[in-house]
Every structure is written in structure tokens, then in C-alpha cells.
Image: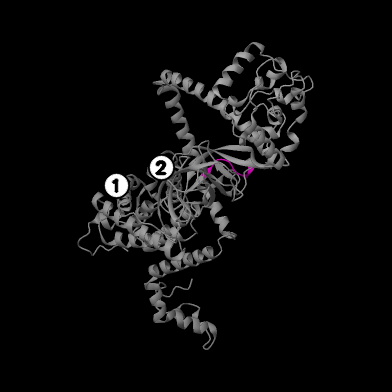
Amino acid sequence: MLRPARCGSGSYSQRPGASAVVPGTLWAVLAKVLNSEDMNFFSRHKNTLVLAAVLLAQLLALGVQVKRQTAEGPVRVIRLVAVNSVAPFERFFIYIGGGMRGIWSNYIDLRNVRRENIRLKAEFEQVRLDRAREQEDARQARRIQALLGFKENWIDSTVAAQVIGTSGTESSRLLYLNKGSSDGIKQDMPVITPDGVVGKILTVYGDTAQVLMISDPTSGMGATLVNSRLQGIIKGSSTGRVQLNYIMGDETVKPGEALVTSGSDRIFPKGLPIGVVTQVSMGRNLFLDIKVKPAADLDRLEEVLVITEQKWRAPDTTGLGPIRASDILAQHLPGVPEPPQAAAQQAGQVAPANQPAQAPNAPAATQKPPVVKPAVIKPAAVTVPAKDASAPKPKPRVPAAKNGASTAAKNPVQKPAVPKPVAAKQVTPNASGAKPKSTAIEGGHPE
Amino acid sequence: MRPTNLSYTSREQVDVYSFSWPVSVGLPLLLFGLQAWIPVRFHYLRVFDFGLLLTIFFAVSRRNQLSGTLTGAAIGLLQDGLTRTPFGAFGIAKTLVGYLASSIGIRIDVDNPGSRFLLAFVFYVFHRAVFLGIEHELMGQSISINFGYEAGAAAANSVMAVFLFALLSRFKIRE
């Protein structure tokens, strides 16, 4: 509209209608400015000025955002527009790529499948064995936790999501998922794979969610070194490298040590695998510089799990049998190895009997098979005096009795669970008056 | 706008091109979608910055500093929207690239593969320098520069530019 340089008339005041300008008014001043050399300067350097204006606007916007990191406000709208503009293209590529890969992997590339099947079957058998052993360990751990009143953070539900995109830049390690608020995903929910931790939900949109990976420079997560139990903070860097911070320089950390989540950030459940220490060196400010290789392959993520619900509750001990102090004692008391001669004698005498001299009203728990130290369990040692009165008097297991008795007496938790009546019942049938071998501890728990 | 008085430019070089609206809007979105999707499958292809290449291409084709500035700003802000960086970080870097590329496009021949390779290489390095400067000075983040990696990424982007520019030239409309 007011373009004196282009109107061709040479002067704004000379344009038709401009004669109505009254000297001395604001309009006259404006017309004078527009006709001045300054205005010609603006029109001559239009491109440079536009560049400066655009840069200035962005610098201002940048300053506002950097100062107000948490209050996104109107910025979030721009981000939303950007994400929603690109998301359909990402979905399109995922759809096409998934179809192509499906055709290739399901119909064409089936070489070595039979051989792999055999290998996997063998591996599966091994895993089953390992699993059985670990289940037993887990049961024991839960019994102990319940006894000590520990509570655990349990993962109650997860949502599987597909990775449909990334930030596309080196400096920002973000992922985009194909699930959003409509699928129950909320901000700060942990994102994992079966291998380990990936990151947390940063922003949630309707059908899309943004994940901040642990390799992003702005991320942070509490971590514990598995062997040394040292705690630090896992952070990313601008190059995508993951490192463990805030471990003091005088601590000993060795490469190869595993890292798990500590749960101290109140976002990630405790005990999830994070990665392995790859390099340790002395860093700045008296802290160690510890590089970590993430357990999850952060560069090749296709599907992830979002933990949508966590609950703190006591461990479930259903089906684990009664919780007894003797189970705890069994973990701590040293087993007393039997002298070889006595052991051979007992074996010869007990083998034919093969009947535990359990009193009819003895607690059922005493018949429970041993869990931890099978070598120490000797039900026969209890039964010998009862069945065979003429048997030579075995040496009493004084150290074990002493140790156990004193421990039980000192510990108010353990004391009530030591079933003295059982010991009495086992002793009474000894008609010969021989000194009973069994003690309260031995009667109380089969170990 | 057409510096035909410059003796060292051919007629081809001084031609000014434009692009249809679907190409101007759809092409950046399509390439950003591709750039966001590629690292999911091939993480080592994360080095390609299609936004930068597109900024250079539009700027040198239109040969208009105003247009180059605005195109760079728009593409940079779109890229900011897809990352965790504040709005303006990529925006400023690409605005400068758009302005300078269009300025160069007026003066020198940018339609042969050799000059395209050099142009993309120089602007990639310039863009990274500006971005890292913003990240360090304005955003207060610590940065670590691996010169070998940056040089490799610049070369990779330059090779990509040669092929991409040849492909995108089909969408040019001579004014």
C-alpha cells in the first residue's frame, strides 16, 4: 500500500489524493519519512532486512523457550502441528516397509529355518531348566521379603507400541510411537523392551507419543551398579553416548559390570536392566567418567513396551507354603558337616527304615522338602533315637544347636517360629534314655 | 533479478525457477517423513539432513534471497517441531543457509554436479557450526565435536545432494 519506491511517481505526496495531506499533521510526518532517503534504504535492502527480522524473531522465540523450559504454552501448538503434519508420512512409510519386509521374511527368505528351529528347541530346553531353578530362588526371595515387610514395585500392565519415527537428527534422541493418549499412554511412563530400558514418554498426542531415549542429552535416570551397589545418574550426550554420572572417583567400577534401574527417580521400576559398563576413566570434578552400552539396542528399535501401571505391594507368597523363621535361619546358619564315620553309620542304619519319625501332630511344615541346603538336611538324624534305642549314641551337634539357639533367642522375629514341642516329641520316644541328638533347631526346620 | 550482464554465467544459469504449491509444501513434509522413518530401520542413515538439502535446493533454484530466507526459516522451524530443541535452533541455522544459498545461486553456476557437491559440503559444515554454536552459547549445552564424523557426514550429504538435486530438478518450473 505505502510503497513509495515502487509507485513510480517518485514521491508519496505526489500520488493522487496525497494533496489532502495537511502540513504539520501526523500523516504529513509519515509521508515525509516515506519519501526520505531512509525509506529508500529500506527498500534497497529489503532482503537483508527480512533476513534480520526473521532471525531476530527466532532468536527471541528461542530465548523465551530456553528461559521457560517447562511452560510450553503456545509453543506446544506449533509442535503439535509439526508432529501431526509429518506423522501421516511416517505411518505411510511404516506401512509400506512392513508389507515389503513381511513378504520378504515370510515367503522368500526362509533359508536355514529348519536348522534354526532345532537350535531354538535345544535352547528352549536349557531355558526351561534355568527357569525352574530361578523360580525356586524367586520363591525363596519372596518369602524372605514378606517376612521382612518389604514392598515391591510391580509392573501391572503394559502397552505394546510400534516405533514409527525418530527426530531425524543427531542432536535429539527421540522416538515416535503409534500409540497415544487414546491408548492410555501418559507423560513420564517408562518405555522398555525385553532387553532393557529405552526411555520415558515425553509428550503425548492423540494417536502418537514422543519418547525421550536414555541417550538424549536432556534425559536422566537413577541407576545402580549390580555388583558394587553404587548409585548414579544415567545421562545421554549430544553424540548419543550413554554415561553413568556422579560416581565418586575413589570408588572402584570395572568394565563389564551390569547396571539396573534404582527406582530412585520414581518413574522406572527398580531392577530393570539398563546396560553394561564399557569404559571407566577419571572425569572432571572428582567423579568417574563411566561409559555404558545400553542393554536395549537403541538404534534398532521397532517395538517397545510402555509401562502404563505400576503398584507398590508386598510380594505374593500364595502357594509358597507357610513363611517360617526357620527359612530365614536356613539362609544364615552355617551347616555343620557330618564326620565321615558317623555319616556312614547313620546311612547304614537309616536307609532301611526310611520312615520319618514324625509325631502325628507335628507341624506339617517340618515335612517340607529342603530348599536351600540339601546337604545339611538330615531327617534321619532326628529319627534314629526314636526307632532304635540300642543304636550307639551319636554325638550331639552342639555347635549347630548353640549357634541356632543363641540366634533364635536374640532375634525376636525368629524366636516364636522355633517349634520346641516338635523337638520334645522327637525326644520322648527314646526309651533308653540316650541323649537326644536333635535340638530345637533341628526339629524346628529340616535343614 | 536476472543478472544477465554477468559474463561468466550462461543463459541456463540465470534462469529463475519456481515450484508449484503442492511441491513447495508436500516435498518438505515427504522428506521429513522419510528422514524420521529411515533411522528406525537404518540407524546409520541418520546423518542425512534432508531439510538442509531441500533448503539449499529451493534457495539456489529460486535465486531470490527473500524466498530463500523464508523457505529456510519454515523448514528449520518444522524440524525444530520434530525434535526436542527449542523452536529457533534449526530455524536460525537454516534461515542463514537459505539466504546465503540464494545469494550464491545468483552469482555462480549451481547446476552441475561438482558445484552442487561443493555447495552442499560447505553449507553442511556451516549449518552444523551455526547449530552447535546456538546449542552451546544460547542453550548452554555442552557439545563434543568429532571432526572425522562431521566431515564424513558432510561428504555423505553432499553425495546425496548430487542425486537428490537431479531428481528434484524435474519439479522446476521455468519463470
Circle 2 marks a residue in which chain?
A: B
Q: On screen, B131 above or below A169?
A: below
Determine the residue located farthest toward the right in the rendered image: A361
What residue did someone put label 2 on? B43
Q: Nearer the viewer, mark 1 or mark 2?
A: 2
Q: Answer whether residue B87 is magenta in the image.
A: no
Evaluate whether residue A313 shows in this view.
no
Amino acid beneath label 2: His
Find numbered disc 2 in the image and state the secondary structure of the residue it sits on.
Answer: helix
Q: Which residues are magenta?
A: A176-182
Kindly indicate the quadrant of the structure image that contains residue B67: bottom left
Sequence-wise, the earlier of marks 1 and 2 is 2
What residue sits 76% from the left and 36% below the top?
Answer: A416
Determine the residue located farthest toward the left in the rendered image: B7
Observer-nearest of A139 and A83? A139
Q: Give the CA distance from mark 1 to mark 2.
A: 18 Å
What residue did someone put label 1 on? B159
| Labels 1, 2: one chain | yes
What residue sits 38% from the left and 69% below the top?
Answer: A48
Find numbered disc 1 in the image and state the secondary structure of the residue it sits on.
Answer: helix
